[in-house]
Image (cartoon, coloured by chain):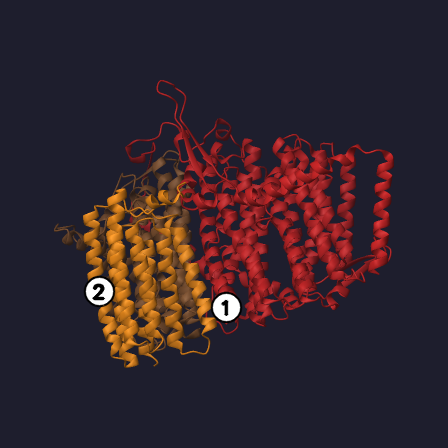
Chain colours: A red, B brown, C orange
């Protein structure tokens, strides 16, 4: 019984967390604990995969939690699929942690929370009533918050933790309200009861917006993304990988569960809202990423971009579903889920790579790195694969999901509403723009960090990462390539999920000749990752052989030529900021009000001239600053309540109680 | 039998494009030279250049990595695969279903990924300037290309290149505004992607305006030969793409006999010469833009593509 | 009214929108005038084609008015005016060109969405022509709004008027009298603006309309 095994796994993870509290300071604790969690996640991964391919929905209830509800758990195709994502990422992170955790300065602040965090994410996916869901959700948030605060002395970490806990609470609050509305006045909090009830259109729209706020803030949807680039990089790298690669997918799961499963048939305009938010996230996310110089922050912003991509798929699926185009909705949802899977692999891989760089050099700032391909060849290779993959280039995996999304967009003329007809191609243009910018962003990331010449002494003496970290990275890179070469198998594996949620699924890809993939049955478009890979490999081999036979084989080494004026110092290389300068001038001037300021020393002064770049975060200025100042204003006004006498406090409580009773008396 | 014929067409196409690519470069150079009243190098000069480069030693910078040495082959291979999938003289390419138009554009994106990385590998400032400008140009050219694909694919109801070409040959296509917009946009993208005037100047060296040449500045010998060949191949690819999408006349249909293929080959050659002449005249009459005018140019291409897609909804209420 | 007839009408009307975009993109005065001339040529072709397919000979007169006045006479006069005024050839646009083009795309989308919804059930060619015409009008307004130079504002105004003519010819049967009166009113407007331009210039030494704000107490 898979659900039993999975719950036992979660129990084991929680026990591991307790054990970690006791032994965390011992030297042997780190490898043992990570190995154990890798093992448990492996079991959970295996169980979930088997259940995804050949399983039927199963439920399990415990007499825990609220007395009249209990704790309900359910395992269906949707949760199995996300369990696979979570446990695959968790297993890789645990494996990576065996090596990476050795360098941790405060293991007692990481080790207990790590398994707890994993258990929290898994429990969210299995919850079958609102109470269990919210409890697990909050547990996951708090555990990840504790992990973010692992290095709590750094001022930026403190700010990150503060913003994170605020946003997480607001998100949970929104979800709480959403479930409250869904449960209705009778308070039926079980998902089965919610599924059976049909909310009015107005109520459904409210729930959609609340779900967008609740799940969207956890996923990092613009404009609720502000905490994400602060919190994700602050955690230890394998936790960053989990938060960026996996926890955002749990948020996607929450959105799908509420909007696609619990809420009933959608309205067509829901699609527009989700599409526009997704498109904006994709473009804003990648532009933010392009202007950062902190390695992990670039990755965190790139997560926002990919979440935007996934939400565009979800929005398309909503729009198609509202108009009754089941096949197209299945295609769009498959694209979204496939991309979620791809992104979890790629982002984990890239965060592992950044962790390896951080351990080897002590640097996260790209402008202090450079030339690491010579010192850390295997890490460089794995990160190159990740960068290539996340730029959505064939034959890697993200291209396949991007291809499916574009194919879904191309079905949009079938939609009857003019709003959708015009919005969908425009969002398509946004996606195309963000995909191209993502390639630029990751060329920049890899080029500045790993290529060129070392910019600081610490980098010049860096060492390759340990075996465990390397094997985790290489395994993920292999998965990415395999998912890109055989996308049909992944799509088929997602099939049952789509069948469950939409009621239709994409054509079975395994039956398409030569392992090609096709978007819908009557389509004449196809893509074959395997053949593209084989063709590239063959032509490269042919060219190399031909050149080897025909051309001169001699190679001489010499100093850099650079047009006859080689740079004296590695500092003069193109830096992360200078690489982004053309794009900053094109896009940043409007969206970020980017300004460059050159501070020239007066004549005779020997100090260097300095270039300063000012970027303004419009969303922060327009949305958050007013809210913060309003809260501050109200707090100031409420300050008088702090200095009242006991009698007055008592009378306040008394008045509040009477008011509530009055409300109850009148309302009921 | 049919399989053998298809395989023959595919194989011929694959080697034809490689053999023809330097000729196209040479032809454009010759035409430009004549337009500027110069004698100009012979048309076959690019072949000689390639052979000469092959015979020379490779001079590698001290800190060049394996990526720098592998990149030329990867760039060439991806370009070659993309070029082999664009119908030139016959639509019946055996493997045309393995990559549609989106995948072909993404393949060209992969070549750019490696080219820009190779530019940054040595850590010289020319390479950096080239790479950073190239990604800026690509960040606008690629979405413009995707929008062109959207307009064409919405019309033909497929992103498969051979299917689109078939559709363009069929009588139902008619004169459409969208096609005009897509054509103008595709030409603009093609000019930018192939580093032609007014976006970049293929004949310049050691100027602050160059983009493509700056990235490959550190390459020499056989590596440079492979990259140059890939560049010519990409130019031929775009010419074939425009020819196949907007002037598909003479293209041998799927399963046609050898006569149709012969006609197709003749027509293809004529189209190439026309395209070279048009490009040469265009390049002779126009001046290179400032780098920061290029985004406006490409932004216009992107807008045209988007406009074309939107206008589709007007056409016969699609 | 099908097949090639329809296609050509469609193509010409669409090209008019395209040329409007070229005007939006162009930031040099001489080039702007040339493109305006092209705009008028495309308009006259479009009107001529409508005359042909609607069998309405009076539209040929409209077409020739468009060709003579708008494509030849007005550009030449404006050209000479620029030379006489000796104004610099760069147009100072408000905001970046990319953003303006984006707004333009939005306007075209808007006019399509509005017109195709409103005119549902009408003749297909008329629907399209009207949708395109509204786009041209809106784009003309956009040109006027985003330019500071008086001459380019005039050009924007003229292109707006071209859109009106397109709409009128598409909706079969606008009387010739209306046609001619519109053409002449525009001509008079043109002359008035021309005189006005010289007046501005005499007084303020520039044709930048911001100079006028000072006398309305609106100067920043």
**A114 sits to left or right of B59:** right
User: Of A216 and C141, which appears nearest the observer?
Assistant: C141
Tell me where residue A188 appears, x and y as whole percent.
Answer: 79, 62
Where disc 2 sits, the SS reads helix
Which numbered dot is residue A418? Answer: 1
Q: Can residue B226 be seen in this view?
A: yes
Q: Which chain letter matches label 1?
A: A
Tell me where residue C124 appears, x and y as whole percent.
Answer: 40, 77
Tell me where residue A590 appears, x and y as whole percent.
Answer: 44, 45
Using a 10 Å C-alpha cutoff, classify the residue at mark 2 as few (fewer than 14 neighbours), some (14 to 19) or many (20 or more). Answer: some
Which numbered dot is residue B295? Answer: none
Residue bearing the label numbered 2: C69
Q: In which quarter of the image is residue B216?
A: top left
Separation (CA) of disc 1 from disc 2: 39 Å
Q: In which quarter of the image is residue A581?
A: top left
Q: Which residue is drawn at 21% across and 47% down?
A: C85
Quarter of the image where the N terminus of chain A is located: bottom right
- Tell me: residue B113, above or below residue B144: above
Does mark 2 fall on the same chain as mark 1? Answer: no
Tell me where residue A315 appears, x and y as whole percent.
Answer: 57, 61
Q: Quadrant of residue A18?
A: top right
């Amino acid at each position: 019984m898979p659900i039993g095994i999975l719950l036992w796994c979660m129990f084991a993870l929680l026990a591991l967390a307790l054990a970690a509290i006791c032994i965390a300071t011992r030297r042997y604790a780190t490898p043992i604990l990570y190995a154990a969690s890798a093992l448990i996640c492996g079991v959970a991964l295996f169980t979930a995969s088997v259940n995804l391919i050949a399983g039927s929905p199963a439920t399990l209830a415990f007499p825990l939690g609220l007395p009249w509800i209990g704790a309900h758990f359910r395992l269906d195709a949707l949760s199995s699929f996300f369990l696979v994502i979570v446990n695959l990422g968790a297993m890789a992170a645990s494996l990576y942690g065996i090596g990476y955790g050795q360098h941790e300065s405060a293991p007692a602040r990481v080790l207990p929370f790590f398994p707890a965090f994993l258990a929290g994410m898994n429990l969210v996916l299995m919850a079958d009533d609102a109470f269990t869901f919210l409890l697990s959700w909050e547990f996951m948030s708090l555990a990840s918050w504790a992990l973010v605060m692992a290095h709590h002395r750094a001022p930026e970490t403190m700010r990150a933790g503060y913003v994170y806990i605020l946003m997480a609470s607001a998100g949970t609050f929104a979800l709480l309200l959403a479930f409250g509305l869904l449960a209705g006045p009778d308070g039926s909090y079980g998902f089965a009861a919610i599924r059976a009830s049909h909310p009015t259109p107005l109520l459904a729209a409210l729930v959609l917006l609340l779900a967008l706020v609740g799940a969207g803030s956890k996923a990092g949807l613009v404009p609720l993304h502000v905490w994400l680039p602060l919190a994700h990089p602050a955690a230890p790298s394998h936790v960053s990988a989990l938060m960026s690669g996996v926890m955002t997918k749990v948020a996607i799961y929450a959105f799908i569960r509420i909007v696609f499963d619990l809420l009933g048939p959608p309205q067509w305009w829901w699609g527009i809202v989700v599409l526009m938010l997704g498109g904006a996230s994709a473009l804003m996310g990648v532009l933010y990423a392009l202007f950062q110089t902190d390695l992990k922050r670039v990755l965190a912003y790139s997560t926002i971009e990919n979440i935007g991509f996934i939400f565009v798929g979800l929005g398309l699926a909503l729009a198609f579903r509202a108009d009754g185009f089941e096949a197209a909705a299945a295609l769009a949802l498959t694209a979204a889920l496939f991309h979620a899977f791809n992104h979890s692999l790629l982002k984990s891989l890239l965060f592992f790579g950044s962790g390896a760089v951080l351990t080897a050099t002590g640097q996260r700032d790209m402008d202090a790195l450079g030339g690491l391909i010579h010192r850390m060849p295997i890490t460089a290779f794995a990160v190159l694969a990740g960068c290539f993959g996340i730029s959505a280039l064939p034959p890697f995996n993200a291209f396949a999901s991007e291809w499916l999304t574009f194919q879904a967009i191309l079905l949009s003329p079938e939609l009857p509403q003019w709003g959708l007809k015009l919005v969908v191609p425009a969002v398509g243009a946004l996606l195309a723009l963000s995909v191209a910018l993502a390639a630029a962003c990751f060329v920049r990331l890899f080029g500045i960090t790993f290529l060129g010449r070392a910019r600081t002494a610490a980098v010049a003496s860096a060492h390759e990462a340990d075996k465990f970290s390397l094997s985790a990275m290489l395994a993920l890179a292999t998965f990415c390539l395999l998912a890109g070469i055989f996308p049909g198998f992944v799509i088929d594996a997602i099939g049952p999920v789509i069948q469950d949620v939409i009621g239709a699924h994409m054509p079975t890809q395994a039956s398409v000749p030569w392992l090609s993939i096709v978007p819908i049955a009557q389509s004449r478009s196809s893509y074959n990752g395997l053949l593209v890979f084989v063709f590239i490999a063959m032509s490269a081999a042919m060219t190399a052989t031909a050149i080897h036979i025909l051309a001169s084989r001699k190679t001489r080494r010499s100093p850099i030529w650079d047009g006859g004026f080689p740079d004296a110092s590695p500092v003069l290389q193109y830096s992360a900021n200078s690489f982004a300068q053309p794009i900053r001038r094109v896009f940043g001037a409007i969206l970020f009000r980017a300004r460059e300021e050159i501070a020239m020393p007066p004549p005779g002064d020997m100090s260097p001239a300095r270039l300063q770049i000012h970027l303004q975060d419009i969303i922060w200025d327009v949305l958050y600053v007013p809210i913060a100042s309003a809260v501050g204003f109200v707090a100031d006004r409420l300050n008088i309540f702090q200095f009242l006498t006991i009698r007055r406090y008592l009378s306040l409580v008394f008045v509040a109680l009477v008011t509530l009773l009055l409300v109850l008396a009148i309302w009921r | 039998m049919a399989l053998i014929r298809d395989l023959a067409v595919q194989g011929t196409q694959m080697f034809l494009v490689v053999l023809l690519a330097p000729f196209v470069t040479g032809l454009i150079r010759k035409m430009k030279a004549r337009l500027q009243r110069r004698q100009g190098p012979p048309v076959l000069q690019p072949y000689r250049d390639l052979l000469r480069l092959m015979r020379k030693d490779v001079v590698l910078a001290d800190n060049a990595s394996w990526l720098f040495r592998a990149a030329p082959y990867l760039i060439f291979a991806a370009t070659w695969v993309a070029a082999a999938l664009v119908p030139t003289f016959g639509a019946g390419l055996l493997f045309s279903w393995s990559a549609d138009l989106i995948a072909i554009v993404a393949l060209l994106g992969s070549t750019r990924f490696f080219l820009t990385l190779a530019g940054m590998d040595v850590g010289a400032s020319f390479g950096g300037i080239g790479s950073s400008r190239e990604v800026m140009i690509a960040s606008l050219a690629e979405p413009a290309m995707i929008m062109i694909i959207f307009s064409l694919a919405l019309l033909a109801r497929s992103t498969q290149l051979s299917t689109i070409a078939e559709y363009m040959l069929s009588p139902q296509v008619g004169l459409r505004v969208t096609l005009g917009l897509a054509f103008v946009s595709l030409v603009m993208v093609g000019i930018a992607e192939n580093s032609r005037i007014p976006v970049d100047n293929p004949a310049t060296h050691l100027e602050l305006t160059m983009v493509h040449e700056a990235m490959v500045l550190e390459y020499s010998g056989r590596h440079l030969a492979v990259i140059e060949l890939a560049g010519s191949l990409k130019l031929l690819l775009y010419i074939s793409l425009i020819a196949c999408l907007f002037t598909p006349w003479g293209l041998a249909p799927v399963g046609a006999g050898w006569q149709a293929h012969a006609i197709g080959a003749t027509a293809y050659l004529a189209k190439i010469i026309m395209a070279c002449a048009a490009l040469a005249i265009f390049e002779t009459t126009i001046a290179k833009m400032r780098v920061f005018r290029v985004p406006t140019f490409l932004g216009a291409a992107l807008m045209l593509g988007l406009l074309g897609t939107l206008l589709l909804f007007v056409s016969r209420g699609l | 009214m099908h097949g090639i007839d329809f296609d050509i009408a469609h193509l010409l009307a669409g090209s008019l929108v395209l040329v409007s975009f070229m005007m939006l993109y162009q930031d040099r005065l001489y080039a702007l005038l040339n493109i305006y001339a092209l705009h008028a040529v495309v308009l006259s072709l479009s009107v001529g084609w409508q005359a042909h397919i609607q069998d309405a000979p009076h539209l040929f007169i409209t077409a020739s008015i468009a060709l003579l006045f708008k494509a030849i006479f007005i550009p030449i006069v404006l050209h000479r005016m620029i030379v006489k005024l000796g104004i610099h050839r760069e147009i100072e646009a408000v905001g970046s060109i990319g953003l303006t083009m984006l707004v333009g795309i939005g306007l075209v989308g808007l006019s399509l969405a509005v017109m195709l919804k409103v005119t549902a059930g009408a003749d297909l060619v008329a629907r399209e022509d009207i949708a395109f015409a509204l786009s041209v009008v809106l784009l003309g307004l956009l040109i006027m709004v985003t330019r500071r130079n008086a001459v380019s504002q005039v050009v924007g105004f003229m292109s707006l008027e071209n859109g009106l003519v397109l709409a009128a010819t598409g909706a079969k049967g606008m009387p010739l009298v209306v046609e001619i009166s519109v053409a002449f009113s525009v001509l008079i407007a043109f002359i008035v603006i021309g005189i006005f331009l010289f007046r501005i210039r005499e007084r303020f030494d520039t044709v930048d309309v911001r100079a006028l704000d000072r006398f309305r107490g609106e100067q920043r």
